[in-house]
Amino acid sequence: GESVGLHLPTLSVQEGDNSIINCAYSNSASDYFIWYKQESGKGPQFIIDIRSNMDKRQGQRVTVLLNKTVKHLSLQIAATQPGDSAVYFCAEIPDPNEKLTFGTGTRLTIIP
Amino acid sequence: GAGVSQSPRYKVAKRGQDVALRCDPISGHVSLFWYQQALGQGPEFLTYFQNEAQLDKSGLPSDRFFAERPEGSVSTLKIQRTQQEDSAVYLCASSIKETQYFGPGTRLLVL
């Protein structure tokens, strides 16, 4: 069936460096994508979202890029901090107010 | 402001016991979702409510799982005759548009 997956399960980055987390999706009908951050023992926390009619969106220290041609999504975190250490999930939904389909996540570790 | 809250945060149940997990969504959020998250995995959809109407329950793994939202606000996920494979974190999320906001989850351990 349709699924969202991640290329790298773990990623270690030096504090202050930039990090890039990648995600591949397979449902071409998906209209909306979200990146979530999940710290140990907590629920997923919304980071940034993007619609399928956009290819880039920026937030505070984060940028999401969407390449619909190759069905690829990435999350860029600038000037990483120790608090950025967490598991990051991309998720997709084909329509508003429908279920999210998550990947298995990438664990980001920031090295002091 | 208050986010999504869930209770209990932790629940240990003996196999065969019934459990009830509560979700208090963000006030005014029409949509409410339940997800199950196994260790090391991403959350998986269980069921979805719009107000009090359960519009999608395709993710519920068996008829031992039941969810309700009788007044369109608080929701309860009930698991009857718990099995060891039900051990997981149960996440609730609410939304008013596309973005779903998650609660902290209930970690269920079935012994």
Image (tube, rainbow, N blue to C red):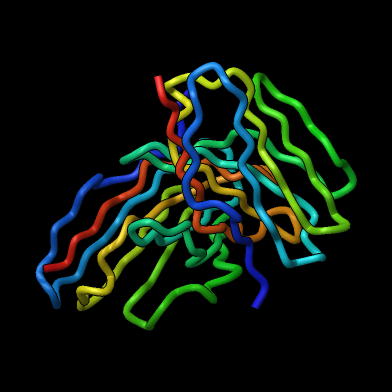
Between A50 and B21, the one lying in front of the other is A50
Q: Residue at horizontal 32%, vertical 79%?
A: B64
Q: Residue at horizontal 75%, vertical 50%?
A: A32
Rendered image quadrant of residue A26: bottom right
| B86 w.r.t. A73: above or below | below
Mark count: 0
Q: Would you say A76 lies left or right of A39 here?
A: right
Q: Position of residue B66 (x, y in %)?
A: 38, 72
Rendered image quadrant of residue B62: bottom left
Q: Position of residue A45 (x, y in %)?
A: 50, 36
- On the question of residue B108 being in view, the answer is yes
| B39 w.r.t. B74: above or below | below
Q: Would you say A34 lies left or right of B89 here?
A: right
Between B107 and B26, the one lying in front of the other is B107
- On the question of residue B102 being in view, the answer is no
Quadrant of the image containing the C terminus of chain A: top left
Quadrant of the image containing the N terminus of chain A: bottom right
Rendered image quadrant of residue B103: top left
Q: Position of residue A89 (x, y in %)?
A: 55, 48
Q: Would you say A18 lies left or right of A50 here?
A: left
